[in-house]
């Protein structure tokens, strides 16, 4: 494992998605890792509540999708 700093967003346009994230690369055996759940989320709702500290981002989940 090793940390990576990655820049998110545009440097010329103000955006609520302008942020710096930290990524972690993990090497794994693909036979031992399984995608368990996938959700559809409302990005507009997340943006509207970006500065609301009490907002629970799980409220933006609209539905759970089936995994094929």
Image (spheres, rainbow, N blue to C red):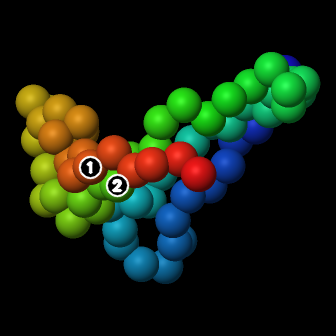
The residue where tag 2 is placed is 40
In terms of depth relative to the viewer, which is nearer, 8 or 25? 25
Residue sitting at 68 percent across and 37 percent down?
23
At 40% from the left edge and 59% from the top edge, which residue is drawn? 17
Mark linked to residue 63: 1
Quarter of the N terminus within the rendering: top right
x and y percent of residue 11 in the render?
Answer: 53, 71
Instruction: Indicate the quadrant where residue 57 lies.
Output: top left
Q: Position of residue 33 (x, y in %)?
A: 74, 25
Where residue 48 appears, as percent x and y from the top left, is 14, 59
Q: Is residue 23 left or right of residue 46?
A: right
Where residue 8 appears, as percent x and y from the top left, is 55, 58
Which corner quadrant of the image does residue 44 belong to? bottom left
Mark 1 secondary-structure assignment: strand
Q: Is residue 23 above or below residue 1?
A: below
Classify 10 Å Cα crowding around label 1: few (below 14), some (14-19), many (20 and above): few
Q: Taking 17 as reference, is 5 left or right?
A: right
Cα separation, mark 1 vs mark 2, equals: 5 Å
Disc 2 element: strand
For image coordinates 59% across by 51% down, the residue present is 68
Residues at discs 1 and 2 in contact (Cβ within 8 Å): yes
- Name the quadrant containing residue 14: bottom left
- Residue 20 visible (yes or no): no
């Amino acid at each position: 494992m090793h940390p990576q700093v990655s820049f998110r967003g545009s440097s010329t346009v103000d955006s609520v998605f302008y942020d710096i994230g930290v990524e972690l690369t993990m090497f794994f055996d693909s036979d031992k890792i399984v995608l368990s759940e996938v959700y559809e989320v409302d990005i507009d709702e997340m943006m509207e509540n970006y500065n609301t500290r009490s907002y629970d981002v799980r409220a933006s989940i609209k539905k759970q999708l089936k995994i094929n």
